[in-house]
Image (tube, rainbow, N blue to C red):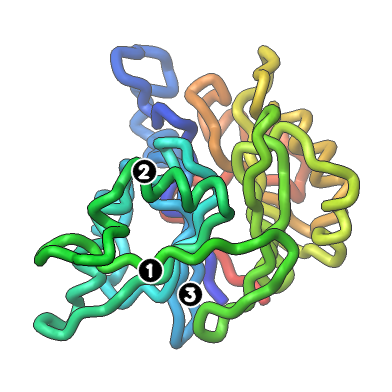
Amino acid sequence: MLFTFLGTGTSGGVPSIGCQCEVCTSNDPRDNRLRTSAMIETDNTRVIIDCGPDFRQQMLRVPFRKIDGVLITHIHYDHVAGMDDLRPFCSIDYPKLYDIDIFADKNTASALKQSLPYCFHENHYPGIPRLLLHEIPPHRSFLIGDIEVTPFIVMHGKMPILAYRIGNLAYITDMKTIPAEEMKYLDGVDTLVVNALRFKKEHHSHQLVDDAILFAQQVGARRTFLVHGSHDIGLHAESSKRLPANINLAYDGLTIDFE
């Protein structure tokens, strides 16, 4: 399977509007971070994780093909604001139309119906994305095409959100802590993708880099990729030198293999 980092930035993206710091003015493309999102592909199936406000820009960078499912972690704007831009993938073989399955927990599914009611109305009018919303409970595995997904819970401050186990990869964003009983869903993880906002200055609902390193060591993953970074995480080239050998700053467009 292939895993592509579509975006690796925090809620405001990098560069940050109006900022003239060395990261926001960097010429290194690895320092330009769209809002955090990812794509998983086999020969037969394509799955997106989160569909934020940069989704259109992200998908212009990858080959166009059918999307079989979208996994949503939580309802925050930077993770769901691009849902309307799924429209082209519903008409990839126009005039034949495709439905796209959207997977979210109960609270997120309810909030999506309120924030984007026209996308989930029973009577579709022409031109809107054809989205089938599925409420998924944590810990119950399901298939999207030939990709098996197991959702589990992490805490975004005081808010429970979904993380996903796919094969020997675990994908976690916006985590501050994880309940002890959820750690078993990380057994045997080889590739860990997890959030790290910056090196210093505590945040009420996000891990810092040191938190992410400690968590990766607890999981015992062979390799870890850090996402959801702000401009305060520093220049990619310099900050990467501060990390253990098996922990990497992910960057937009990076693609890795996993089983």
- Badge 3 element: strand
Residue, x 40% and y 27% (percent of image)?
Answer: 12
Circle nearer the N terminus (2, 3): 3
Q: Which residue is mark 3?
A: 41
* Residue 255 in view in this figure: no
- Quarter of the figure that contains the N terminus: bottom right
Residue 203 image offset from top left, x and y in percent: 65, 19
Residue 128 image offset from top left, x and y in percent: 18, 60
Residue 52 image offset from top left, x and y in percent: 38, 45
Q: CA distance from mark 3 to mark 1?
A: 20 Å
Residue, x 29% and y 13% (percent of image)?
Answer: 18
Please state which amino acid type lies under the numbered disc 2: Gln
Residue 218 image offset from top left, x and y in percent: 89, 46
Is label 2 or label 3 in front?
2
Q: CA distance from mark 2 to mark 3?
A: 30 Å
- Quarter of the figure that contains the C terminus: bottom right
Please state which amino acid type lies under the numbered disc 3: Glu
Is mark 2 in CB contact (under 8 Å) with mark 3? Answer: no
Instruction: Name the foreground residue: 237 vs 85.
Output: 85
Q: CA distance from mark 1 to mark 2?
A: 15 Å
Q: Which residue is mark 2?
A: 114
Q: Which residue is mark 1?
A: 132
Circle nearer the N terminus (3, 1): 3
